[in-house]
Amino acid sequence: MWDANVGALCGERRVITWDMRGHAASDAPEDASAYGVQQSVGDMAALLDTLGAERAALGGMSLGGYLSLAFHARHHERVTSLILVDTGPGFRSEEPRREWNAFAERTAEALERDGPAALSDSPEVGEHDGLTGLAHTARRVMAQHDAHVIDSLATIAVPTLVVVGSRDRNFLAAADYMAAKIPGASKVVLEGAGHAANIDAADAFNAAARDFLGDP
């Protein structure tokens, strides 16, 4: 999903992409307890440790953006900047959180019931050997149980770029909220892009990201 962006962002900068556990080439444990926001944040830290990167600019789209915020909340000293694409910070109120978690559960059930037919046709969706990991991810990583990520926005002290596609109606308000709550954050709306703005408007995304990151 980042193929159209990596080359444009490299130069003298090392760019690392990875598959979450349960996704694509990464292992997909059968045990549901192996999945969660804490485990995902731990995987991110372990990846940076393995590659000898003490600090990094974190970029993530959708769930990846939420996990980037969760990583910053846990390991802020390891983050130099954030690029948050078509994502949101979660919910502070119980009712919208319950509605979101019900959506996550329906997603998991559809993956288990319908198999590949349940996969979204959004362009960021890749190929997977099995869907068990995706179902566990929906239930255990997408689902939210507290407000620690949204409550952390005001504490973010690193440069932050919020990117959203103009047609990504589900996340336009979230982008506005994050841009308002994160001190000094910048926001870019990519015209004509949907819920995969880095793919739908790759050239515009790459230009905005390069401008934001500056020289490595």
Image (tube, rainbow, N blue to C red):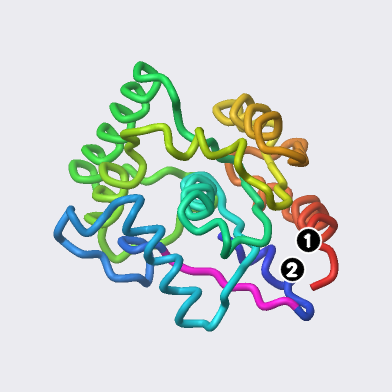
Quadrant of the rendered structure where residue 148 is? top left
Task: Specify whether 52 is left or right of 213.
Answer: left
Q: Give yes or no for residue 35 being in the magenta stretch.
A: no
Q: Which residue is mark 2?
A: 9
User: Marks 2 and 1: which is nearer the front?
Assistant: 1
**92 left or right, relative to 69:** left
Give, as a single range, the part of the protein colored magenta: 13-19
N-term-proximal mark, 2 vs 1:
2
Residue 107 pos. (x, y %):
30, 37
Q: Quadrant of the N terminus?
A: bottom right
Helix, strand or loop under label 1? helix
Q: Residue at x 68, y 28 (%)?
A: 176
Q: Which residue is mark 1?
A: 213
Image coordinates for residue 151, horizontal then vertical, percent: 50, 33
Question: For the residue marked with disc 2, what is the amino acid?
Answer: Leu
> 130 and 60: which one is in front?
60
